[in-house]
Each structure stands twice: as structure tokens, then as C-alpha cells.
């Protein structure tokens, strides 16, 4: 895995507000297709709840407790947080209350995000076509699309995305997520994968922000010396939320990336754009649900600091030269004024000696030989 700049934020707000949550009515069983590699919260409103699972791939038998699974955590209110779920962790998830009664049951298919098929409507790219699978009978493989997410920008052109999950349907039967349907059956088909579709959007701004968090500034990231790139991770970003990145206030779009026009950044499709790969220093900002959540400023390299020092030194030298020049001009002016004053004083004294005042008599001496 490439080097990752993992910037973890600790918010005082409840965890439920920052994870994509799946809920199911109490006492019911709900079936859901999701993506691997993206954190998810299975809701269970039962303080002190116990969770058990039955994986449908590779494991059979009795329910097993979730207390020893490294990427799973039972929250204080009873919900189950699954971080970076694996495709192999698809199966049945049971929430029982502290009295030993089942509260809710989830049947989850974590579809492999590494096989994601991404398209952009404005580039004329098309989603996957339906296909027929033959497993004793004719099964139809198709994509079931989720609703469009909100536009990632407002008051100016933006983009929005929607997720599509692989489903299989056979005649007179209800459709099921592909891998829940297949179970232990080993089948390979390029059609058995989830999808991500993007399109342009333009909406008005509203004050209905859902995050209400202060953005954070990270000012110490630098490119890796060996790979010459770094990954930035947008806090609160998710495959299931609108995410928008800007480099020096220039929007980074899926359209530019998918059309091959952008070679200096890379939005990671498997995270819905939460992770950004950058190849040159810049000020990067990320927005989640149109709200600024983080700003990334590059750390200055030794070469940059040295160049800045040379530039500052040159500017200081020029300033000193300018000050010295102005001081010399002032000194020359003062000397000239002093010379003029001195000359005028001497001229005044000479005139007084040559032309005495009218009220004063001069003494004349007559010499007789």
C-alpha cells in the first residue's frame, strides 16, 4: 500500500453523526449491499448490546461473538462500528440486548470496492449492461442504483455521485445482492462488481449544514522523497458523502481525472474521493457536504527555505542601499544649505562695512604737508 498521510480527528460530537449508518426496525431482519473498505455503522438502540455474526463465506455453524474482531467495535449506545470492512466479512449480524433477546438482524454483502466500475455521464461513459448467469436456471445480473448524493459544491458548477450494487434475480424470486445470493458458489464474471457514477450539478447554497464542525489546518505535509507523492485523507469524508477537493482554490473534478486531463492529483475512487494523491506542493482544501473540514499546507523544504532566505537577504540589501542613497542625498542637501547660509552671512557683513548706515558719521582725517 502506498504511503498514507493518516490525519485522524477526535471530535467531541457523538460518533453516530460521523459514520454512515444503516438502520433496521426493531425485531426485523434487513438486507443491505455495501462497499468494502468504507467504514459503516450498523444501528442498534440497546445499551449494553451483544453482537454475533455468521459469515456466509468460508465459515458455517453457530453464531460467533464479535468482541475479538480487530476492525469491529461496539459503541456505548449499542451500535456496531465496522472499520474498513472486508468482502469476506459479509454475512448475518445479530444484535442482542443484555437480556439475551434479539433486537435486530442485518444481512450484509460487502461488495469488493477494488473492482469498482466508475463512469461519468458528461463524458458519455456508460454503466455496466445487464447479463445473464446460468447456474441451473437463468439468473439476471444487474445494478441496483442508490439515489444521487447531494452536489459537492453550491453556487458554482459541481459534481454528484451515486452508488450501484450488484444484484442477482431469478424468475419469480426477489433480487438479492450478488454475493449473498451466490454464497459458497464459486463464480467468476466481470459483471459481478459494484459501480460508481458521477455527473455535473449546479445548486443554490443553503444554511442546512449537517456537520457543524470547525475546520482544521495541517501545515506539515511533504512529498515522499522516494515516491515523490503523498496521500491526503479528508476527515469525515466517505464514499457515502459528497466530497470536494481544491488545490490553491482550483476545484479537482472527477471529469478532469476520468478524461485524462489531470496528471498532478488523483482522487481515489475506492474511497469516493476521500483520499487524494498529490504530486506537487500546494494548499489543498477538502469539503464534505459543501462544508470546509480541513486544509493541508505543504511543509517548506530546505531548498525552499534557502531560496526564501536568499530572496529576503537580497531585498534587505536593496532596502539598505536605498536608505543609504536617501541619507547621502539629505546630507548633501544640508551641506548645500549650510554653504548658502554662510555665503549670505559673509555678503551681509561685507555690505555693512562698505555702506555704513545713514545716521552714522564717518571720521575724516586731513593730512597737510
Image (cartoon, rainbow, N blue to C red):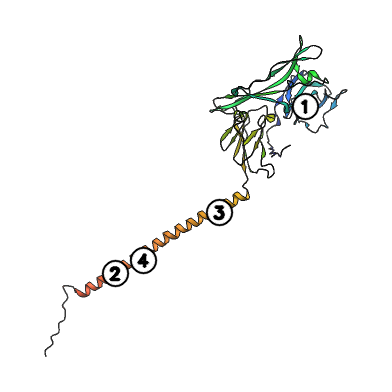
Res 26 → quadrant: top right
Q: Which mark is residue 316?
A: none
Q: Nearer the viewer, residue 125 or 13?
A: 125
Label 1: state its secondary structure: helix
User: Any mark on residue 87, and which?
Assistant: 1
What kind of element bears circle 3? helix
Pick the residue in front: 17 or 133: 133
Quickly name the residue at label 2.
343
Residue 116 visible in the current orientation: yes
Real-space CA distance between mark 1 and mark 2, rounded to the nearest whole angstrom: 101 Å
Q: Position of residue 246 (x, y in %)?
A: 59, 35
Q: Is residue 210 left or right of residue 65?
A: left
Disc ID at residue 335:
4
Q: What is the C-alpha distance between the residues marked 4 and 3?
A: 37 Å
The label on residue 310 is 3
Position of 96 with respect to 248 (left or right) is: right
Indicate whether 159 appears above or below 263: above
The reply, left or right, for residue 223 in relation to residue 170 is: left
Proximity of marks 3 and 2: CB atoms separated by less than 8 Å: no
Mark closest to the chain's N terminus, 4 or 2: 4
Q: Residue at x 63, y 50 (%)?
A: 302
The residues bearing labels 3 and 2 have C-alpha atoms spaced at a distance of 49 Å
From the image, state whether disc 3 or disc 1 is nearer to you. Answer: 3
Quick one: label 1, few (<14), some, or many (20+) residues within 10 Å? some
Where in the figure is residue 294, as x and y percent of width and height? 62, 37
Q: Quadrant of residue 104?
A: top right
Asked if the residues shown at circle 1 and circle 4 are in contact, with their CB atoms under 8 angstroms apart, the answer is: no
Amino acid at each position: 500500500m502506498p504511503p498514507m498521510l493518516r490525519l485522524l480527528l477526535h471530535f467531541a460530537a457523538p460518533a453516530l453523526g460521523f459514520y454512515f449508518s444503516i438502520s433496521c426496525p426493531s425485531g426485523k431482519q434487513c438486507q443491505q449491499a455495501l462497499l468494502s473498505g468504507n467504514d459503516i455503522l450498523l444501528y442498534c438502540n440497546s445499551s449494553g448490546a451483544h453482537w454475533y455474526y455468521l459469515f456466509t463465506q468460508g465459515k458455517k455453524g453457530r453464531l460467533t461473538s464479535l468482541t475479538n474482531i480487530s476492525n469491529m467495535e461496539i459503541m456505548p449506545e449499542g451500535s456496531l462500528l465496522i472499520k474498513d470492512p472486508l468482502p469476506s466479512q459479509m454475512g448475518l449480524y445479530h444484535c442482542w440486548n443484555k437480556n439475551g433477546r434479539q433486537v435486530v438482524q442485518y444481512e450484509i454483502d460487502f461488495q469488493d470496492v477494488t473492482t469498482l466500475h466508475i463512469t461519468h455521464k458528461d463524458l458519455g461513459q456508460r454503466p455496466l449492461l445487464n447479463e445473464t448467469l446460468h447456474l441451473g436456471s437463468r439468473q439476471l445480473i444487474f445494478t441496483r442504483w442508490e439515489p444521487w448524493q447531494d452536489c459537492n459544491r453550491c453556487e458554482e458548477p459541481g459534481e454528484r455521485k451515486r452508488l450501484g450494487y450488484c444484484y442477482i434475480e431469478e424468475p419469480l424470486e426477489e433480487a438479492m445482492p450478488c454475493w449473498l445470493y451466490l454464497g459458497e458458489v464459486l463464480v467468476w464474471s466481470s459483471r459481478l462488481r459494484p459501480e460508481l457514477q458521477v455527473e455535473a450539478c449546479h445548486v443554490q447554497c443553503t444554511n442546512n449544514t449537517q456537520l457543524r464542525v470547525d475546520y482544521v489546518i495541517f501545515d506539515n505535509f511533504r512529498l515522499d522523497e522516494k515516491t515523490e507523492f503523498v496521500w491526503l485523507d479528508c476527515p469525515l469524508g466517505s464514499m457515502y458523502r459528497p466530497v470536494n477537493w481544491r488545490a490553491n482554490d482550483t476545484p479537482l473534478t472527477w471529469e478532469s481525472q476520468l478524461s485524462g486531463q489531470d496528471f498532478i492529483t488523483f482522487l481515489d475512487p475506492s474511497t469516493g474521493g476521500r483520499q487524494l494523491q498529490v504530486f506537487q506542493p500546494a494548499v489543498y482544501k477538502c469539503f464534505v457536504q459543501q462544508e470546509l473540514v480541513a486544509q493541508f499546507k505543504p511543509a517548506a523544504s530546505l531548498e525552499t527555505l534557502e531560496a526564501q532566505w536568499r530572496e529576503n537577504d537580497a531585498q534587505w540589501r536593496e532596502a539598505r542601499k536605498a536608505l543609504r542613497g536617501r541619507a547621502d542625498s539629505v546630507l548633501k542637501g544640508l551641506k548645500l544649505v549650510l554653504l548658502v547660509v554662510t555665503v549670505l552671512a559673509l555678503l551681509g557683513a561685507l555690505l555693512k562695512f562698505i555702506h555704513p548706515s545713514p545716521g552714522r558719521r564717518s571720521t575724516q582725517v586731513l593730512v597737510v604737508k
